[in-house]
Image: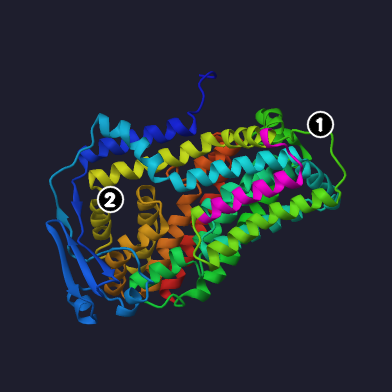
Amino acid sequence: MKHLKFPSAQSILLLIAAMVTLLTWVIPSGKYNTLSYDKSTQTFIQNKVDGSLSLPATQATLSDLQIKIPLQKFTSGAIYKPINIPNTYTKLESQPQGFFEFIKAPIKGIIEAADIIFLVLILGGLIGIMNKSGAFDSGIAWLAKTLKGYEFVLIVIVTILVAIGGTTFGLAEETIAFYPILIPVFLAAKYDAMVALASIYIGSCVGTMCSTVNPFSTIIASNAAGINWTTGLTGRLIMLGLSAAICIAYILRYAKRVKNDERKSIIYSQKTEIEQRFKSLNTTTQLLNTRLRLILLVFASCFVIMIIGVSMLDWWFIEMTATFLVGSILIGLLARVKESEFVDTFVKGASDLLGVALIIGIARGVSVIMEDGLISDTLLYYASTVTEGANKGVFTNAMLLIYSGLSFFIPSSSGMAVLTMPIMSPLADTVGIGREIIVNCYQYGMGLFAFINPTGLILASLAVVNVGFDKWLKFVTPLLVILLVFTMMVLTVSVYL
């Protein structure tokens, strides 16, 4: 038994894909009718199983369809994806996925996830060029000297900043870019890579879990529930502050233990391997001169520009990838890297993150199987019937757990919002609670499960450092239990106030 190893991330995802493939033989196929707004014709398009239908874009049409959402949410573009129409679930002829569909799913997933995969590969090339320039080593040496005795500040700052990004614009996939940069910094501060992973990933999870102005979760979910996104905002802000404090305290406690005795590290057996993986290509550390400072400025600017673009300019993966590519070229010129060396170094850096890119694609393949097997809407339909007749407290906590479970099958926050809110939010009316509670259950449920969701980002994040999923579970499970209990208490109190 000692020689048995926990499966790799790729194997875990393929096992999950196989499990979901089998589920398509057991779970009945079914689908809700959907409604979308066509700007070109200024009409609604109702998509049914047997075809589509054009409807007048009026509030009366929405009322007839039992959709309690203001018309303006559609016409303004606030709701830009097709939403499920309540009480339209239809059982369909079973679409079980076979062996060949299972084999093709990862390929389809890689194709569908091409945008984020190219972002990861270009980012790998940028990291390679940065290592070649020597600016990383010099900057890390300066930072380690500056923070000497106050290294814990690094944990607090990184976690808070990433959480702010998560709560404001849904910083999640973009955090893949931060691991290769910040892990060497944490190692220089005498922490292990798990502390860096936790500060970044948990910061992102708690931020998106307690989203406040995030257009990809809070706003789109509130719109789809037919309420203003500011409803319940105060409670989410309080939840954000308290949850972030719990997470930071947990990470600091572990970090202090590792700093005092490196053998207490959960990944102590990988210490040498990880240090070698993140060491620079340079054998000596240069002084942080003007040229290296300029390189670091260009490098940091890439991320600042990326964040501004995503949060304010409607940028997405193509624009982010282009930013990193331009940054790589500028840094290569500043570092006076020869053209042939630049290409070789860039390609080598990209290849270092190829495994991460493949994990992202395979994870998307799991969603492909569910979509082709038509089981996602069936799961939603039965989930919506589970809470019938429950009291407020039981109903709310059941919704929290239901959303956690659904997020395994629908890891996209915006996808979850438009598919589930028109179905789930009216259930709040039947038990006498505000619809903002359903929005909270959606956010908290997805956010909590994101800590360990294998169809989300965690496996890709762990692959950057080559840390096993089993070791992450050992680290994060106590924190997850604490947050789950705390969240259930908060939700229970909120419905009785």
Residue type at mark 1: give it: Thr
Left of 71 or right of it: where is 51? left
Q: Nearer the viewer, residue 351 or 412?
A: 351
Residue positioned 64% across, 60% down in the render: 304
Which numbered circle lies on residue 376? 2
Name the spot of residue 219 as percent of width and height, x first.
43, 70
Residue positioned 72% across, 39% down in the render: 131
- For discs 2 and 1, the disc positioned in front in the rendered view: 1
Residue positioned 82% across, 47% down in the render: 144
> In the structure shown, which secondary structural element does the residue marked by tag 2 occupy?
helix
Q: Nearer the viewer, residue 386 or 304?
A: 304
* Above or below, comparing residue 57 to residue 81 in the picture: below
The residue labelled by disc 1 is 283
Residue type at mark 2: give it: Ser
Span shown in magenta: 319-340
Left of 396 or right of it: where is 90? left
Residue neighbourhood size for the residue with mark 1, other residues' Cα within 10 Å, grouped as few (<14), some (14–19), many (≥20): few
Residue 331 colored in magenta in the image = yes
Name the spot of residue 414 as percent of width and height, x first.
40, 60
Q: Nearer the viewer, residue 84 or 237?
A: 84
Earlier residue among tags 2 and 1: 1
Name the spot of residue 95 as percent of width and height, x first.
18, 41
